[in-house]
Amino acid sequence: MAKSLAGGGRRRAGLRAWVVRVGSSIVIWTAVMHLMQILGPASWQPRLPKTWPSAACLDRRDPLRPNSTSMDAAAAALGEDGGAHLSPPALLPRRLYKSNGYLRVTCNGGLNQMRAAICDMVTVARYLNLTLVVPELDKTSFWADPSDFGDIFDVDHFINSLRDEVKIVRALPQKIKRKGNREPLSMQPISWSSEKYYLRQILPLIRRHKVMHFNRSDARLANNGIPMRLQKLRCRVNYEALRFTPQIEELGSKLVALLLQRSSSFVVLHLRYEMDMLAFSGCSHGCSERETEELTRMRYAYPWWKEKEIDSEKKRLDGLCPLTPEETALVLKALGFSSDTLIYIASGEIYGGEARMASLRAEFPKIVRKEMLLSEEELRPFRNHSTQMAALDYLVSIASDVFIPTYDGNMAKVVEGHRRYTGFHKTILLDRRKIVELLDLLQDEELSWDEFTESMRELHKDRMGQPTRRNVLLGRPKEEDYFYSNPQECLAVPQRRYPHENSNANNKLRDSDI
């Protein structure tokens, strides 16, 4: 009898446990279904391994160009009231690590110099297991732009899109500030340094002081010899994490749409014939005596422009000067661009104004600028913010059919690399040294126009942004190819191997490396 009662008790207990399990399963399943409805199906799709090429590498479409798929998707996401009902993207899992300290960074230079520097500093912070404070932007250079990081880039996206690699905070925590009244250790890292320099020289300082401030950040990480994992992180920051603010993205998209309403294709000409560039470089070819004196005074007024006495003609013959508008007109015509080509000028104010643009506009009357396409009301928030204006030009440049820089400054290089990353879109890399030689022969009537045209086309047939390897010059980093102009480690180039891809041992960055 006792055994029978005991057996019955066990059966009832087992039944209760079974009922609890079934009930729990129903509750969990119901919760999962509700969660899927909230987040949407995209949030439940599997993530590709980090070593796979980014979809952006393989997408040959222009990133800002409207297409039926994206437009249909956008329309489907709108309710009857026209308001967006897009589900927020799922957050990446946070990488958990013991931080070795905080890194503050003050960027210097224009938009694209700062952009590359931010990519480098994120990479350094990741490698050293640091917590990065959202970078501060240059407000004291020639442009005197008061814009903060959040005025140009989407801060939330920047932080969240990198949370699986590095912790980024908007500001130093109060508890860190209260620990001492002293300013953090401030220094300039050595230019073009390898990751080993930061590991051996910088990390011990950060561990000792807890907060480090880099007061300059341009070109502080080497182009070559960096582990593959770090090179790919530089690309990820540049092409995925550094997204412009919604206001800039929206206006950039509108500019592209307005250009496509005028023509099915357009060319972006980065005409770097601006006062600051001419003064800095000492290039005064074609300028009047008064203009030359004005440029010289400006060069001497800025102490961080180290070179003062400059032989303008020698620099021009060495190919170190931006092409003038007059020279550019002849080059474009010789390369085969017709007079009805729609050309967008991506630059600030041209030195000499419309008078200096006269010959270029005579050959190519369909020249436009953002000021001609957008209303004063649309541009008003961006006035006196040269970096934000440059961001608009950047968006149009990466969406164009052809991009032609007349000088290889930071924008030219960074846009070139971005266009390679999105599918090797045509970028004509002008050989200014040879061009100047040919132009002078043409002017001296030692070359006919047909000979000049034939020479120009032959000279540039392999300078159209095709896949190529970076030129490495040991011990001469300023003269070798810039990483951000050709981030070959991140490009989807079939059956192409690069020297440092042979060793898999150096390709992964492990948390145990620090």
Image (spheres, grey):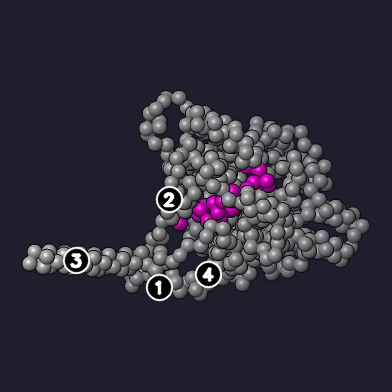
- Camera-side mark, 2 or 1: 2
Asked whether the viewer can see residue 331, the reply is yes
Report the residue at 73% width, 67% height from top.
337
* Relative image position of residue 217 (x, y in whole percent): 59, 39
- How far is disc 2 from disc 1 in space, using C-alphas? 31 Å
- How far is disc 4 from disc 1 in space, using C-alphas? 15 Å
Q: Earlier in the sequence, mark 2 or mark 3?
A: 3
Q: Pointer 4 and pointer 1: residues touching (CB < 8 Å)?
A: no
Q: Earlier in the sequence, mark 3 or mark 4?
A: 3
The amino acid marked with disc number 3 is Gly
Return the residue at label 1. 76
Q: How many marks?
A: 4
Return the residue at label 4. 66
The amino acid marked with disc number 4 is Pro
Horizontally, is 147 left or right of 481 in the view? left
Return the residue at label 2. 94
- How far is disc 3 from disc 4 in space, using C-alphas? 61 Å
Q: Earlier in the sequence, mark 4 or mark 1?
A: 4
To which quarter of the image does residue 127 belong? top right
Disc ID at residue 8: none
Return the residue at label 3. 14
- How far is disc 4 from disc 2 in space, using C-alphas? 33 Å
On whether residue 76 falls in the magenta region, the answer is: no
